[in-house]
Amino acid sequence: MKKRVYTSIAIVISLVLLFVLKFYVSDFFFDAFFGAIACFAAFEMSRLLSKIGKYNYLYLSTAFPLLILAMNIGGMYIAEMKQSYFWVLYTILIDLGIVVLVTFGAFLFGLCRKKKILNEMSVREINDSVTKFAFMKALHTAVAFLYPAFLFMFFIFINHLDMMPLGRLEGIESKVSVFAVLTAFIIPMLTDTFAMLTGSVIGGKKLCPKVSPNKTISGSVGGVLWCVLFGACVYLIFGCMPAFEAFIDVFPIWAYLLIVLIGSCVAQGGDLIESVIKRRAKVSDSGKILPGHGGMLDRIDSYIFMAPYILIAFWIFAI
């Protein structure tokens, strides 16, 4: 328990420092942070897939987020230069294209290493053709590309939201990206914390006993309600800050609370998806990098779908 508390304190301090650096120095500190997290999470996802029997390229999966990181930062600068938010969409499509190209490259790489592929098949006692095994290995690697790397790296777009010409928010001198990134962080944090507290106090029927036996329906509902309540407090606090007044003036509280409410449900869905993967891999944690918390993937499971959700939500409102 002490390890978990100490790790949580370290995480909070790190995030506070990153927000200070983002506000006063540069957005790139968060970019590096997101890139590092994505690499660790992709590494753990690759290992989980192997435990399930979905063999893949571990090092390729681990390094892939760095390629997406570079593409997304480049895409944001082009969007700012062209003054067109459509370049974000183009960048996302390019990212998907890169997933396909690298996956195909991994397939060809496997075919060119026929002897090593045969040795691997022999060790793993797989009775298939070399072509089929190489194809499936590349395909499983693509799964690690998409989850968590591709989805989590949407945080880069959120982190540079100030660079994007966004309709009603265009021309507003306000750190929109700070508000968006903070929202993406606090929704899963508040939901997870209050779902655990509400569930332990009220108890009741299990939410998904076969996937996550500790989660209850009361905890899930409580997590959403408390998240919305604290979301309102965050909104009001930011409304009192001069740096965000102009943004808050065009962003009604009902819109923000709707984003928080739906986001809380998205966060819980992301948590359950990772629980399914761990259940299939027959492990309790995705890794051991965070004492008391398990692996990096355990810590960011609620954020993987949160990143694209927050981008879309803020985008819809702004346009």
Image (cartoon, rainbow, N blue to C red):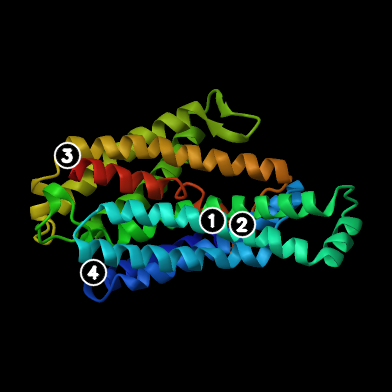
Whether tag 4 and tag 3 are in contact, CB under 8 A, the answer is: no
The structure residue drawn at horizontal position 44% and vertical position 42%, both measured from the top left corner, is: 267
Q: Mark 3 points at which residue?
A: 253
Q: Which amino acid does label 2 sit on?
A: Thr
Which mark is drawn over residue 23? 4
User: How far apart are the two marked residues, 4 and 3, measured between alpha carbons?
Assistant: 23 Å
Task: Give the residue at mark 1.
Answer: 99
Name the image quarter holding the C terminus: top left
Q: Is residue 295 visible?
A: no
Q: Distance between the residues labelled 2 and 3?
A: 44 Å
| Foreground tag (1 vs 3) | 1
Contact check, label 2 and label 3, Cβ < 8 Å = no
Compared to residue 202, the image places residue 151 above or below, namely below
Residue plotted at (37% across, 61% down): 156
Left-right relation of 295 to 183:
right
Point out the tag, 4 or 3, that comes first from the N-terminus: 4
Name the residue rendered at 25%, 46% in the picture: 315
Residue type pointed to by label 3: Ile
Element type at mark 4: helix
Density class for disc 4 (Cα within 10 Å; few <14, some 14-19, many ≥20) is few
Residue type at numbered disc 4: Phe
Q: In which quarter of the image is the N terminus?
A: bottom right
Tag 3 or tag 1, which sits nearer the N-term?
1
Among the two numbered marks 1 and 4 on one chain, the one whose residue lies closer to the N terminus: 4
